[in-house]
Image: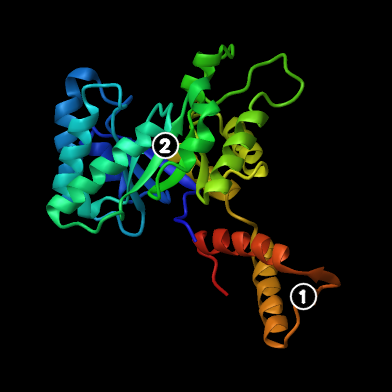
């Protein structure tokens, strides 16, 4: 099963205080940001601070990621080479912003492989997360998702996407008035389908109003209902809500685990299907139950 990414918490790479605090947060993933959260004149200093943090802090069982600058900037290659050469053993994945073509992923894959070979790292261990943030990226999301065996997630960037296609809002991750349904159903569904076809995860971006817990919950629930695996958080106060939304209720988890046990017993008895609580269950049920069971275990449930 993939890594748990119910909550992916953004931490500015320029803030030593925020990085130190992130170690103790209950997010599944911590990503240290060298892109939008860092001013242009702070890029080099933030890069060094992130490398030091990776080498000195204990992130426990969290997934640890660094968001580098985009491939169309002069900072990208410096970020990737410096961070991976000096702290690659402590890194789980690299996040690429503003991905528009599979070539962005392919280039990153090849450069990662060269660094791994040169430094004796396990080749292919470091994953890639790709952010889809404009119309061009969305049109290519299927090819981007399948561009490398390192690919682990497609991430939706609601702020840049809204600006790129002309959605009239100023709060990142919010919904505009005037549309009878949800304006992002198509986007979420397309990203989820592209991710599933490639065997990877789909992650929603941030909700910018950190004081609006109800709004955060509503947007997270909508994304979850469409199959999205997790969501960004940009403030520690958002983590508990997002973890809750992307975790099954304990009763739902217990039922999934019991269904898996019944199905496995049926197979041991030579049957291709089983009856569970009056319902005929088969391989499709097993796959659905397995996903719920994984989410519950990630939430800390134990039998």
Q: Which of the colour schemes (rainbow, by chain, secondary structure, one colour) is used?
A: rainbow
The residue positioned 67% from the left and 86% from the top of the image is: 268
Left or right: residue 142 compared with residue 221: left
Where is residue 112, by image quadrant?
top left
> Taking the image as drawn, is residue 232 in sight?
no
The image quarter containing residue 226 is: top right
15 to 84, vertically: above or below? above
**x 57%, y 36%: residue:** 191
Instruction: Give the percent coordinates (x, y) of residue 85.
Output: 15, 46
Residue 291 seen in this snapshot: yes
Please name whichever residue, 158 or 141, is drawn nearer the observer in this view of the structure. Answer: 141
| Residue 27 appears left or right of 165 | left
Kindly give the residue lying farthest to the bottom in the view shown: 269
Quadrant in which the C terminus is drawn: bottom right
Residue plotted at (57% across, 61% down): 296
Residue 30 placement (x, y as % from top left) = 35, 45
Q: Position of residue 62 (x, y in %)?
A: 36, 54
Q: Mark 1 points at which residue?
A: 273
Q: Is mark 1 on a helix, strand or loop?
A: loop
- Picture disc at residue 130: 2
């Amino acid at each position: 099963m993939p890594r748990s990414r119910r909550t992916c918490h953004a931490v500015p790479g320029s803030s030593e205080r925020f990085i130190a605090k992130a170690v103790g947060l209950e997010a599944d993933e911590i990503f240290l940001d060298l892109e939008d959260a860092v001013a242009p004149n702070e890029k080099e200093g933030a890069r060094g601070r992130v490398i030091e943090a990776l080498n000195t802090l204990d992130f426990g069982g969290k997934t640890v990621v660094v968001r580098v600058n985009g491939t169309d900037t002069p900072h990208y290659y410096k970020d990737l080479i410096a961070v991976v050469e000096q702290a690659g053993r402590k890194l789980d994945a690299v996040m690429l912003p503003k991905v528009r073509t599979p070539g962005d992923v392919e280039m990153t894959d090849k450069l990662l492989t060269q660094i791994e070979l040169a430094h004796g790292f396990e080749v292919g261990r470091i994953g890639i997360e790709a952010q889809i943030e404009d119309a061009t990226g969305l049109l290519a999301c299927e090819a981007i998702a399948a561009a490398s065996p390192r690919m682990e997630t497609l991430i939706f960037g609601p702020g840049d996407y809204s600006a790129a296609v002309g959605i009239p809002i100023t709060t990142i991750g919010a919904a505009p008035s005037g549309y009878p349904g949800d304006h992002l159903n198509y986007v979420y569904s397309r990203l989820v389908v592209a991710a599933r076809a490639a065997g990877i995860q789909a992650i929603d971006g941030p909700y910018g109003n950190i004081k609006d817990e109800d709004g955060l919950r509503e947007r997270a629930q909508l994304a979850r209902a469409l199959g999205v695996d997790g969501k960004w958080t940009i403030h520690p106060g958002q983590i508990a809500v997002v973890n809750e939304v992307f975790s099954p209720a304990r009763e739902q988890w217990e039922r999934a685990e019991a269904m898996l046990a019944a199905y496995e017993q049926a197979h041991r008895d030579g049957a291709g299907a089983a009856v569970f609580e009056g319902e005929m269950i088969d391989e499709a049920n097993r796959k659905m139950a397995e996903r719920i069971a994984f989410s519950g275990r990630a939430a800390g449930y134990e039998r």
